[in-house]
Image (cartoon, helix red, strand yellow):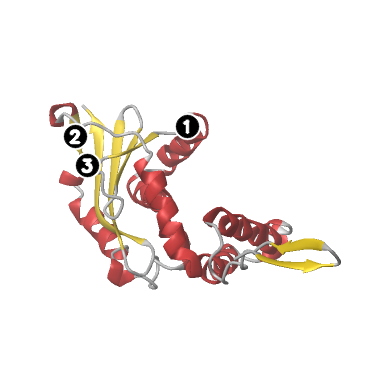
Amino acid sequence: MTVCSLAFGFLICLLPVAAAPPKGSELPETVLRHFLTEVHLGVGVDPRGAGSQNDVLLKIEALGESILKPEFERLHELAARQYLELPVLEAIDPGQWISKRLLLDEIFTAVENDFRAEARGKPPFDHHVLATQWWDPCYAARTLRDVVSRLLMSKDQLDRRRFMDQFAPPRVYRQSDDASKPVLAFWGSNELFSVQLEYDPSGIYVLKRLEWFVAR
């Protein structure tokens, strides 16, 4: 409310001052910039002095717990908007693709068990994959694509893929209209990797099902 009073012959009006936003109500972009800044200061400034790879992962995940986790609700809103902005991939023709899962179902099932909701906080679904960043379904899906690739590809194949991903990364599509149950597809010309996720009340996405198709 505007308050006005007469003083020294002048009408003085005090405009309402917006209250400071309550703690924990920062905009998602502000939170993410804060997180990146702290990771840079805590790890990036002196990579050699940051310790082992496990030490680095622990430090980054600790920052995720303190900075990202309190804002998971707002980050989820951002993630949902970004997911629904992805281009839609039409249904694929089964006759043009071969499923790797048909012959390797045990491996795919094991990965799904490792990253289901009940596995949260247990290796590898902890700091080993920076689980606090799984508020973002795209991040989660990319991580899972890398996990499965490391299990099923030779070192030469994996090195070739990572080399090509630098210059011609796969196109990322969505295959559902439900941001709480996103399905992300990585189309890489001769292969299609699909990740079905589900939003968990803990604030992150968990894995439901994986598919990996190669062109006939």
Most extreme residue toward the left is 95
- Specify few, some or many for label 1: CA neighbours under 10 Å numbering under 14, 14-19, or 20 or more: few
Residue type, mark 2 in image: Ile
Q: In the image, residue 140 lies at what x, y percent? A: 39, 53
Query: What label does residue 100 carry, if any?
Result: 3
83 vs 161, nearest the viewer: 83
Q: In the image, residue 1 lies at what x, y percent? A: 59, 66
Question: How many numbered discs, if any?
Answer: 3
Identify the residue shown where x is 29% and y is 67%. Answer: 117
Q: Quadrant of the C terminus?
A: top left
Asked if residue 67 is positioned above or below residue 207 in the image, the reply reads below
Q: Which residue is mark 1?
A: 164
Asked if residue 125 is positioned above or below residue 157 in the image, the reply reads below
Label 2, secondary structure: give it: strand
Q: In the image, residue 71 lies at what x, y percent? A: 49, 65
Label 1, secondary structure: give it: helix
**Reading the chain from its start, which is encountered first: label 1 or label 3?**
3
Q: Could you tell me if the residues under marks 2 and 3 are in contact, i.e. CB atoms within 8 Å?
A: yes
Q: Which residue is mark 2?
A: 98
- Specify few, some or many for label 3: CA neighbours under 10 Å numbering under 14, 14-19, or 20 or more: some
